[in-house]
Amino acid sequence: MKKGMLISGLSVVFVLAMSALAMAAGEGASAAAGTNTLVMAASLIAAGIAVGCAGGGCGAGMGNCARGLLEGTARNPEMGGKLTITMFITFALIETFTIYALVIGLIALYANPFL
């Protein structure tokens, strides 16, 4: 639990540091470029939070799925093969949510209509 919180905290610090660098890059530009830099920094923070939350949630879901597989196989070893197949299908479906969040984050960064 503590290790996960440490990684989450470091991820937030990294995202904020990157947004600070993005804002510092536009310091010498005009006011309009400064506004664009602020929108870009906000987009960077939003994309990082979205992908981080999706990744954390999907990781927790995969952990619960693997725990269920192990418990089910321990109770009924003959069902291990069927449970494993179901687990891998579930992993694929869970992983798509992280990919969707990544795609939305990339859209927010590179196809942002406010820039």
Image (cartoon, rainbow, N blue to C red):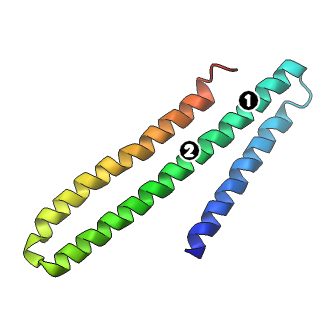
Location of residue 86 by image quarter = bottom left
Secondary structure beneath dot 1 equals helix
Residue 10: image location, x then y, percent: 68, 61
Residue 19: image location, x then y, percent: 75, 42
Q: Amino acid at mark 2?
A: Ala
Tell me the tag on residue 39.
Answer: 1
What residue appears at the point 49 percent right and 53 percent down from the top-left corner?
A: 55
Q: Count numbered badges in the picture.
A: 2
What residue appears at the point 48 percent right and 41 percent down from the top-left corner?
A: 101
Position of residue 98 in the picture relative to residue 9 (left or right): left
**Above or below: residue 111 compared with residue 3:** above
Secondary structure beneath dot 2 equals helix
**Mark 2–mark 1 distance (CA, rounded to whole Å):** 16 Å
On the rendered image, what quadrant is the C terminus found in?
top right
Residue 105: image location, x then y, percent: 55, 36
Residue tagged by mark 2? Answer: 50
